[in-house]
């Protein structure tokens, strides 16, 4: 590799440059969830360059893939491009509420020092915490008194694609085994469920089939696939099962309504099905808020939407 190059945001335009003074490369491509296809750089006098209209976002996560003359490829770098209008969440600098980590069966649990029987349960929990800042948000929001104290339960699933793709066996296990054990240890109230992408789909699916254990849902960039809006996902091996569930929601006369907040990146493919699902849930009696944040299908985008959107949902579900 000749160098790491650079990226710039110039108003409505994004620019990228990758040095190649020795002309050792046959091509450079940019990969990002903000674009539906990889973007090819052009060769320009010892460097590869790309100019692209800025999608509706304030920052961009991307990777560069290099193609060598023999056809082999390698990932050169992963980067983040921040535009001038991007501002990090204020809670990242807030002191956290004191608390401790423990385990309930195979789940990790963060509990504040203040006694509470409120519980937030999150799919993809370890990544939600490590990459999406969920534990940090919880401790900061409690310390700032933006939300009442609550336990944070981080769930994970082996064979994630199968288990989180509207799998009735997983929904039953979550609702009839996992959540009762959590409530027995931490408090008897119905829980708030959270998830991103397939994890958001799985949380809604579990609540729809077994509503008694849930008090609210926080669903980020849910993979609510349907044939009319998501033909690009039709090759996913569980697409038909997911589309079958979203079709069931559309045909139902009413649903087991709880407050729901959805967030979705304004620059991602899932925006259309999230908008549609928000309308479907409203028609089934769910109180729904939908927030479109200026990002794509990324952990940082999901982190940046936690406040005020998760904050608002938790205050709505736990007003006392």
Image: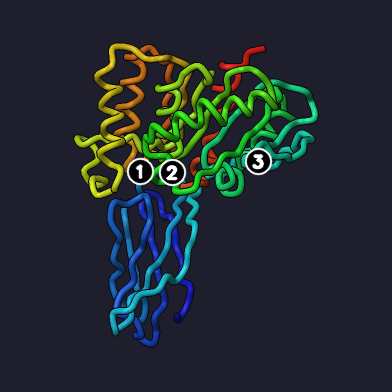
Q: Are marks 1 and 2 in contact (CB under 8 Å)?
A: yes
The nearer-to-camera label among 3 and 1 is 3
Compared with 248, 42 (above or below) is below
Image x and y of residue 88, in percent: 58, 43
Image x and y of residue 74, in percent: 40, 74
Which residue ends up furthest to the bottom in the rendered image? 22
Task: Calculate the distance from the C-alpha at mark 3 to the C-alpha at mark 1.
Answer: 30 Å
Query: Of 48 and 301, which appears nearest the observer?
Result: 301
Residue matched to label 1 = 268
Query: Of 43 and 77, which appears nearest the observer?
Result: 77
The nearer-to-camera label among 2 and 3 is 3
Q: Would you identify the image quadrant in which residue 140 lies? A: top right
Q: Are marks 2 and 3 in contact (CB under 8 Å)?
A: no
The nearer-to-camera label among 1 and 2 is 1
The residue at 40%/46% (across/down) is 161
Residue matched to label 3 = 108
Residue matched to label 2 = 295
Q: Are marks 3 and 1 in contact (CB under 8 Å)?
A: no
41 on left or right of 203: left
Compared with 97, 159 (above or below) is below
């Amino acid at each position: 590799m000749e160098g790491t190059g650079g990226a710039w945001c110039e108003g409505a335009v994004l620019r990228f440059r990758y040095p190649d003074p020795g002309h050792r490369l046959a091509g450079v491509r940019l990969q990002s969830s903000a674009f539906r296809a990889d973007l090819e750089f052009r060769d320009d006098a010892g460097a590869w360059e790309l100019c692209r209209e800025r999608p509706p976002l304030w920052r961009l996560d991307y990777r560069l893939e290099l193609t060598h003359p023999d056809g082999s490829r390698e990932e050169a770098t992963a980067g983040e491009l921040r535009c001038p209008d991007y501002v990090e969440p204020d809670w990242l600098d807030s002191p956290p509420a004191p608390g401790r980590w423990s385990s309930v069966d195979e789940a990790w649990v963060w509990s504040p020092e203040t006694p509470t029987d409120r519980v937030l349960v999150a799919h993809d929990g370890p990544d939600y915490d490590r990459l999406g800042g969920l534990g940090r948000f919880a401790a900061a929001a409690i310390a700032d008194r933006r939300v009442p104290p609550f336990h944070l339960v981080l769930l994970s699933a082996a064979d994630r694609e199968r288990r989180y793709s509207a799998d009735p066996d997983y929904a039953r296990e979550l609702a009839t085994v996992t959540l009762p054990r959590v409530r027995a240890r931490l408090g008897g109230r119905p829980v708030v469920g959270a998830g991103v992408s397939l994890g958001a789909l799985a949380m809604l699916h579990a609540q729809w089939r077994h509503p008694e254990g849930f008090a609210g849902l926080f669903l980020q960039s849910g993979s609510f696939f349907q044939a009319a809006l998501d033909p690009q996902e039709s090759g996913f091996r569980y697409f038909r099962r997911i589309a079958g569930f979203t079709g069931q929601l559309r045909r139902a006369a009413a649903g087991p309504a709880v407050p729901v907040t959805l967030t979705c990146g304004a620059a991602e493919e899932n925006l259309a099905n999230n908008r549609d699902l928000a309308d479907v849930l409203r028609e089934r009696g769910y109180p729904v808020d939908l927030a479109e944040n200026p990002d794509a299908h990324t952990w940082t985008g999901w982190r940046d939407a936690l406040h005020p959107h998760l904050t608002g949902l938790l205050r709505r579900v736990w007003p006392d």
